[in-house]
Image (cartoon, grey):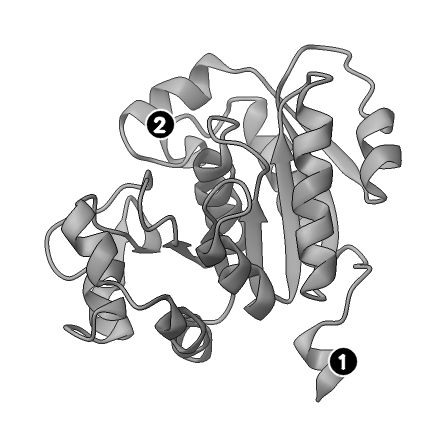
Amino acid sequence: MILAVAGGKGGVGKSTVALNVADALAATVVDADLAMADLPGGRGPDLHDVLAGRASALEAVRSVAGVRVLSCGRTLAGARASDVRRLRPTLEVVEREFGAVVVDCPAGMAADAGVALAVADRVGIVCEPTAFAVPAAVRTRALARELDAGLAGVVVNRAPDGLDVSRFSQALGAPAVAVPESDAVASAQAQGRPVAREDPDAPVVDAFATVARTLADGATDGRTRSDEA
């Protein structure tokens, strides 16, 4: 399974959701935001190197706080040298070797976001609990539909207590799950760790587990690669 975590705008917490969902699923998380990477990394080759043909996908995967991560470089030169056409085979190699893959996609309608959506089996859209977030999420949903990427669920991130997420579900046509605002998430994020590794008793850990189940197991409305087999 390749699960793309996408969003209509930056700053909604895609990277945080991707990292924590990957941890909950024991999956490999790939930072495919070539220009604005945000997932924790380390020394050694990264996705920029892989997409430029300087390293293999498997040698770029490393363990970060107990999670397999294929991080991305943070230089403009690295982004320019990357051949986005290599993203599909890279994700497929990682999936074959390690199993489930979670892809942290670029925000908005960028071409590299479309590549990740096109190869994904299913998509989760992350948005914030504001009226302004819905139109941006709807645009991302439209792009996913054009690419036959099935929408498995919507993650309403940093949600206040008691938020009714049904309007997000109705607007986007998929189950919506709230992830509450949490100091535990902020603390874990500052350490570059999934919250379950930093504070396993935090209530938000259960919310991320629910998100992971929804996105991995929920029905989708698009064609998946298994449908094509």
Q: Which amino acid does label 1 sit on?
A: Asp
- Residue 90 in percent (x, y) is at 37, 73
Decide: is 147 above or below 41: below
Q: Label for residue 203?
A: none
Q: Distance between the residues labelled 1 and 2?
A: 37 Å
- Comparing 147 with 54, the one in front is 147
Decide: is 180 above or below 82: above
**What quarter of the picture does the N terminus occupy?**
bottom right
- Residue 108 in percent (x, y) is at 54, 41
For the residue labelled by badge 1, is the local secondary structure a helix, a strand or a loop? helix
- Looking at this rendering, what residue extends furthest in the bottom direction? 229
Q: Label for residue 189?
A: 2
Q: What residue type is labelled 2?
A: Gln
Residue at the (68%, 19%) spot, across then down? 132
Residue at the (28%, 72%) spot, across then down? 57
For the residue labelled by badge 2, is the local secondary structure a helix, a strand or a loop? helix
Left or right, 219 with reference to 118: right
Left or right, 18 with reference to 215: left
Q: Is residue 214 visible?
A: no
Q: Sort mark 1 into few (<14), some (14-19) or many (20+) by Cα contacts within 10 Å.
A: few
Residue at the (66%, 60%) spot, across then down? 122
- Looking at this rendering, what residue extends furthest in the left direction? 43
Q: Sort mark 2 into few (<14), some (14-19) or many (20+) by Cα contacts within 10 Å.
A: some
Q: Is residue 45 visible?
A: yes
Q: How many marks?
A: 2
Mark 1 vs mark 2: which is more N-terminal? 2
Q: Do the residues labelled 1 and 2 touch (CB within 8 Å)?
A: no
- Residue 183 in percent (x, y) is at 45, 13
Left or right, 219 with reference to 192: right
Tag 1 residue: 227
